[in-house]
Each structure stands twice: as structure tokens, then as C-alpha cells.
Amino acid sequence: MTDSENVPIPGGRDVRATLDHGAIESDGDGDSESPPNACVVACPPHPQHGGHRGDQRLEAVSTVVADFGVDCLRFDYGEWDEGYGELADTDNALAWAFDRYADIGLFGYSFGGCLALVAAADREDLSGVAALAPAPRLNPDIDAVAALDDIECPIRIVHGTRDTTTDWESLVERAREIQANRPPETITLTEVAADHFFIGQVERVGETIGEWFLDRFRSER
């Protein structure tokens, strides 16, 4: 079982998080190796629709990366603020992680996927950003479709082909246009035969996104 602890995220809003610690293996002499120096920050789905840091899709990604020594910070948003405060919460969670780790990945599901992509457009130091069934935009100022052009780190977008909850087509179409003019692996698009909630596919989603982050962290070394 993953060792976890609850941590507060500074920033003026009541933002609480769970930090899942990556496994630390013995070096063969009975001593533990140094703690992991990479972390995935995970943004939950819409808080007004029951989204929270214990979302099973966030936990699935955390389980995969933790098995290979990478920590995962799953956080809850503060008081509802039409996406604006929630974006600030994402930025503050990233700042918390960058104060403690060398390599950071950013992940979000649905509402959180949009926030992850928008937040990534303002960071040049991310190892990668992954969005699962991302909403294309939350309001005129928080637009993941527009943000794609400004993201410099590798991008992974995973969506369900039977997803009728979000307008993923507009975001995927723009990602494909950008993909055609960038080096390979800059943007990776993955389709899953699933609905928006990935019923029966959660473990696969965790492996798909978690292993992608692990590859990104390895390439940083």
C-alpha cells in the first residue's frame, strides 16, 4: 500500500492535498535509497459534480508512478470560483511541488484536464502534462484549446470515443493540427473505447498515463 500524508497547499485559499509517496527500494545492504525526486501533480474533476482528490482515475495514475518511486500530489480545490480560483489552486500546487522536487509532471481529469493544460501554458519547466477527457474550456479566459499552442513540454491527451459529456473533439482537432507541425512525441493522442468516466477502463488509464510520465522523467536524466 502506498504511504500517504495530508498536506496543506499555501496560497490564500483552503486547498488540501494528499501526497502519495513513491516506493523506496533497498540498495541491497538494508539501507533505503534516497527519496524520489519526481512528482506528478493531479487535478481532480469538477468539484460541483463530486470531483475530489480521491477520484479513482487520479488514484490509478498515482499507483502506477508510485510503484516506480515517483510521488503524486492529489489536491482538492478551494471554494468554488468559476474556474479562476481553481486555476490559482493548480498553480499553487505546482509551486509547492517545485519547491521540493526536480522533475514535475501535471495531470488532470475532465475539468481538471482543462486546468492542467491551461496551467502548463505558463510553465517552461514541466516534464510533461497529461489530460484525461479534458473539457475544452471552462470560461472565456480559461481555454485549453487556445492554451495548446503555448505549451512547450510534451503533451499527452487521452479521451474516450464514447464520451458525450465534454466537447473533446474541438480540443483533439486542434492538437492534431499542432501535432502535424511539431517533432514526434511532442503531442501524443490516445483513444480509448470508453465513455467519459472510463468505466471498466480505470486501470488501463492509470497505466497509459502513469507509464508516459515515467518515460518523461527517465528522459530528464
Image (cartoon, rainbow, N blue to C red):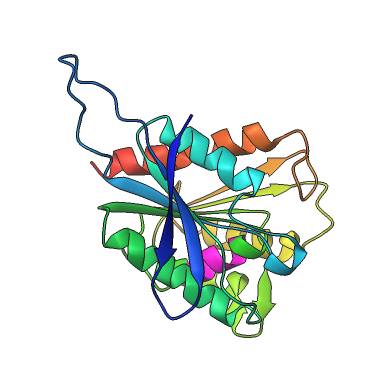
Question: Quick one: 59 or 109, which is closer to the camera?
Answer: 59
Question: Quick one: 118 or 53, which is closer to the camera?
Answer: 53
Residue 110 sits above or below residue 115 on the image: above
| Residue positioned most to the bottom | 140
Residue 64 locus on image (x, y percent): 49, 33
Please indicate whether residue 162 sits to the left or right of residue 211 in the image: right
Identify the residue at horizontal 45%, vertical 66% (top origin): 120
Magenta: main secondary structure equals helix
Instruction: Give yes or no for residue 116 being in the magenta stretch.
Output: yes
Residue 57, located in which quarter of the rendered image?
A: top right
Over which residues does the magenta segment extend?
113-119
Question: Can residue 9 be seen by looking at this rendering?
Answer: yes
Residue 136, located in which quarter of the rendered image?
A: bottom right
Residue 104 locus on image (x, y percent): 35, 54
Question: Quick one: 29 or 110, which is closer to the camera?
Answer: 29
Please indicate whether residue 65 sits to the left or right of residue 207 in the image: left
Question: Can residue 180 be seen by looking at this rendering?
Answer: no
Residue 151 locus on image (x, y percent): 44, 66
Identify the residue at horizontal 35%, vertical 34% (top origin): 69
Residue 22 sits above or below residue 153 on the image: above
Residue 59 locus on image (x, y percent): 57, 42
Residue 199, located in which quarter of the rendered image?
A: top right
Question: Quick one: 45 or 10, which is closer to the camera?
Answer: 10
Give the quarter of the figure containing the C terminus: top left
User: For the image shown, how many numbered marks are present on the structure?
Assistant: 0
Identify the residue at horizontal 26%, vertical 56% (top origin): 100
Instruction: Give yes or no for residue 93 being in the magenta stretch.
Output: no
| Residue positioned most to the top | 28
